Amino acid sequence: MVSDSRSNGRPISDNAADGAQPVVPQIRSGRRRFRPAALALGVLLGVAVGLAGIVVVLIATRGEAVPPLTAEALAAAERLWGEQGPASYRMGIHVGGRQPGPVEIEVHDGRVTHMTRNGIVPSQERTWEYWTAPEQFETIRQDLESAGREGGFGAPSGTKTVLRARFDPHYGYPARYQRLVLGTDLNLDWEVTSFERLDTTDQRTAPATDP
């Protein structure tokens, strides 16, 4: 070891005195290390968000496929049912809303002879008529009137109601109906899943028709 005036009398190494570069301690960089697991998690979350968006779009698109209900469309469908609707038929219906489930109904000469809801025959036969085509029309007609009144359906004043309906192009029965009383549980939704004409003049089985 030697002394040098540049060190204020403190000893310096021989290497420094010979002009060699002093050893500099290594300092860790502040940058974070790359983590493949974090990247993979981010990709998966992005894919999940994208799929959720697609599902929302598909649901919204399906809802828009049912056109808004008008008094003119209802009158035309009832007229078509009066002209083409059979007196005897079997119909399958999927009901949504507050009491969802499948309904099967059989009508002969305009009278209900068999009806099940969720696979069970209701004990009160007076309720069987509710899902016949004429009664479906009556329900829609009453809903159209209620939607035009303030406080219709017993909903709070100012509540918005959306009615949509699609009618079978051959017979006229309500193939799909939606009643949305926004912000309430007063919604109603049904879709005819099958329709079979039973009279001997035109006996055939066919799924519900989408226009």
Image (tube, rainbow, N blue to C red):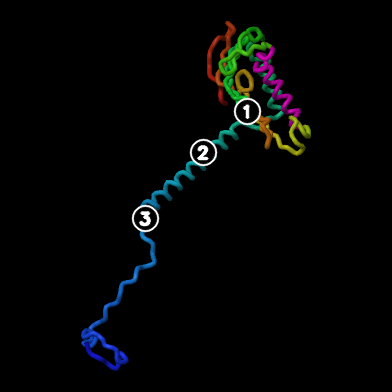
Which residue is outermost to the right?
150
Q: Is 143 colored magenta in this rendering?
A: yes
Asked which secondary structure carries label 3, the reply is: loop
| Dots 1, 2 in contact, CB < 8 A | no
**Which residue bears the numbered disc 2?**
55
Q: Which mark is residue 97?
A: 1
Q: Residue at x 21, y 86 (%)?
A: 14
* Foreground residue among 66 and 81: 66
Asked which secondary structure carries label 2, the reply is: helix
Q: Which mark is residue 201?
A: none
Span colored in magenta: 126-148
Task: Compute the Cα span from label 3 to label 2.
Answer: 31 Å
Q: In the rendered image, which quarter contains the C terminus? A: top right
Amino acid type shown at disc 1:
Gly
Amino acid type shown at disc 2:
Val
* Foreground residue among 61 and 189: 189
Q: Residue at x 50, y 41 (%)?
A: 52
